[in-house]
């Protein structure tokens, strides 16, 4: 019962782990009338305690490392992590910078990577849909 | 406490939850349409609740655990008990002889209070800021609410001698518009406007949602709640909105549909039910849907000043006009023929 409800009601918390703000703007763009993710029940929430999905952007700077881990632990199970943008997946343009602790999957388990610098809102929506599909597969295996 | 009463009460509470959640869905849909979005399906809040019930329920280490865990139950149970005391769907309240308007006013206060206490107990800075704002806001608008209730009660006490003025009995209560002259009508209109202005704050909606401002203080008092507790508080918020709308409908539009059209007595409860829903929808449309679609958030001091000065003054004017209408209205109207 529950997992099905998750499909129609994904609450998303956005963690900015040192992103350049490009990805963040694209995430906000997904909420605008043009893309309107609320029609799929996807909602941006203000605290990780309410979240089902963590959208992580940015290459994880040294300052943000502890905070990212903490936010991950604060999110109640079942949870998904979606990395948005090349920075989060590979460190992108910040590759091998002196102050980078990332990419994200070095620190927390990541379910879906959305590529692009920045990715289009369609790609972000697809990424969240894929994350949900992945959750459903694990349910079938059990 | 007969078994039949318990069954009725449970049925009523379930119905209230269902209607409150669906109205919440309607609200999200209407607001989305106003912003030219498609919006979520109307049953979205029910899906959200189902999802929240299967999520992990985290209690933070810094929280005062028993307060943190009991407050959601206190909030939802008082929000539900409220519906046993106000007339619902054109029918008299189940406990109409046990309660009165003063009790109803108190029942309206407890859910936000419980939410604030839960916020303080959760040991998070965001939550305590949210709780403080909730309390400040409450202190500002309760004054106005009391003025509205007491003005109307005074009106009944002078015009309808045999009526217990604070009673919540639907039959004993004539529509307030019918028992006043022109001055009084304006007075009641002012009171109605003030009560509609209190509505967003009672419901925690824009522009008065500073206590759970998600973009600045991480959902305020709700910040640390998750899973079951959050689901209960979510339902409570929906019930608060619906409950206060019911209250406004009861104060200002207590009339039933049979006063306008004749209907087969067998179907009358059904028609009354839909008439009641239409009234609640109208109240919520004017005070929540439109307002929250077009406004931005007030700061807490602005909201507080808004209620204490502007809205309170308007409600006092309403009371003044009612008094004028009663004492010198007759002579004035005679003067102008
Ligand atoms: S992926 Fe590109 S747009 Fe996104 S944070 Fe990195 S540099 Fe900015």
Image (spheres, rainbow, N blue to C red):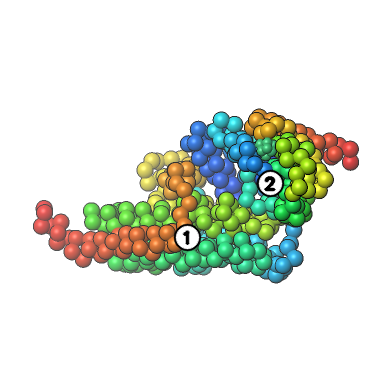
User: Where residue A59 is drawn, which disc sits there?
Assistant: none
Residue drawn at x 49%, y 66% is B136
| Residue in the foreground of this view, choosing between B319 and B132 | B132
Q: Residue B39 occupies which quadrant of the picture?
A: top right
Q: Residue A6 occupies which quadrant of the picture?
A: top right
Q: How far apart are marks 1 and 2 (CA)?
A: 31 Å
Q: Residue furthest right?
A: A142
**In this rendering, is residue B130 above or below A59?**
below
Assign ligand 1 to one image quadrant: top right
Residue drawn at x 55%, y 41% is B28
Subunit ID for the residue under disc 2: A
Horizontal side of residue B88 vs B335, given as left or right: right
Residue indicated by mark 1: B300
Q: Is mark 1 on a helix, strand or loop?
A: helix
Residue indicated by mark 2: A18
Bin the neighbour count of mark 2 within 10 Å (Cα to Cα): few under 14, some 14-19, many 20 and up: some
Residue drawn at x 37%, y 46% is B259
């Amino acid at each position: 019962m529950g997992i099905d409800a998750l499909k129609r009601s994904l609450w998303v918390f956005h963690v900015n782990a040192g992103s350049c703000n490009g990805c963040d703007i694209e995430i906000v763009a997904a909420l605008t009338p043009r893309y309107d993710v609320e029609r799929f029940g996807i909602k941006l929430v203000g605290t990780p305690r309410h979240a089902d999905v963590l959208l992580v952007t940015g290459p994880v700077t040294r300052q943000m490392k502890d905070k990212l881990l903490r936010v991950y632990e604060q999110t109640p199970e079942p949870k998904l992590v979606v990395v948005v943008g090349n920075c989060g997946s590979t460190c992108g343009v910040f590759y091998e910078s002196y102050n980078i602790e990332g990419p994200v999957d070095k620190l927390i388990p990541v379910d879906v990577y959305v590529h692009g610098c920045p990715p289009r809102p369609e790609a972000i929506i697809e990424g969240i849909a894929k994350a949900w599909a992945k959750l459903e597969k694990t349910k079938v295996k059990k | 406490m007969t078994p039949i009463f318990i069954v009725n009460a449970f049925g009523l509470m379930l119905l209230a939850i269902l209607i409150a959640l669906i109205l919440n869905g309607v609200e999200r849909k209407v607001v989305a349409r106003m912003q030219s979005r498609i919006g979520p399906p109307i049953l979205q809040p029910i899906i959200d609740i189902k999802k929240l019930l299967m999520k992990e329920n985290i209690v933070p280490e810094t929280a005062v655990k028993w307060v943190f865990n009991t407050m959601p139950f206190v909030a939802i149970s008082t929000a539900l008990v409220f519906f046993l005391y106000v007339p619902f769907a054109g029918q008299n309240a189940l406990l109409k002889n046990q309660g009165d308007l003063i009790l109803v006013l108190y029942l309206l206060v407890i859910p936000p209070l419980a939410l604030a206490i839960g916020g303080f107990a959760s040991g998070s800075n965001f939550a305590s800021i949210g709780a403080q704002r909730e309390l400040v806001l409450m202190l500002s608008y309760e004054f106005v609410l009391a003025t509205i209730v007491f003005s109307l009660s005074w009106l009944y006490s002078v015009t309808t001698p045999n009526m217990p003025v604070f009673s919540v009995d639907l039959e004993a209560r004539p529509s307030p518009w019918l028992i006043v002259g022109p001055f009084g009508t304006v007075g009641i209109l002012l009171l109605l406007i003030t009560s509609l202005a209190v509505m967003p704050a009672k419901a925690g909606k824009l522009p008065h949602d500073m206590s759970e401002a998600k973009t600045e203080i991480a959902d305020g008092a709700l910040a640390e709640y998750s899973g079951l507790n959050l689901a209960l508080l979510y339902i409570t918020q929906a019930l608060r909105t619906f409950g206060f709308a019911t209250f406004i409908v009861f104060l200002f539009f207590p009339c039933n549909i049979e006063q306008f059209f004749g209907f087969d007595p067998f179907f009358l409860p059904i028609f009354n039910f839909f008439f009641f829903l239409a009234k609640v929808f109208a109240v919520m449309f004017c005070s929540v849907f439109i307002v929250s679609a077009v406004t931005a958030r007030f700061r807490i001091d602005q909201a507080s000043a808004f209620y204490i000065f502007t809205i309170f003054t308007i409600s006092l004017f309403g009371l003044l006009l009612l008094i004028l209408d009663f004492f010198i209205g007759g002579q004035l109207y005679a003067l102008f023929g």
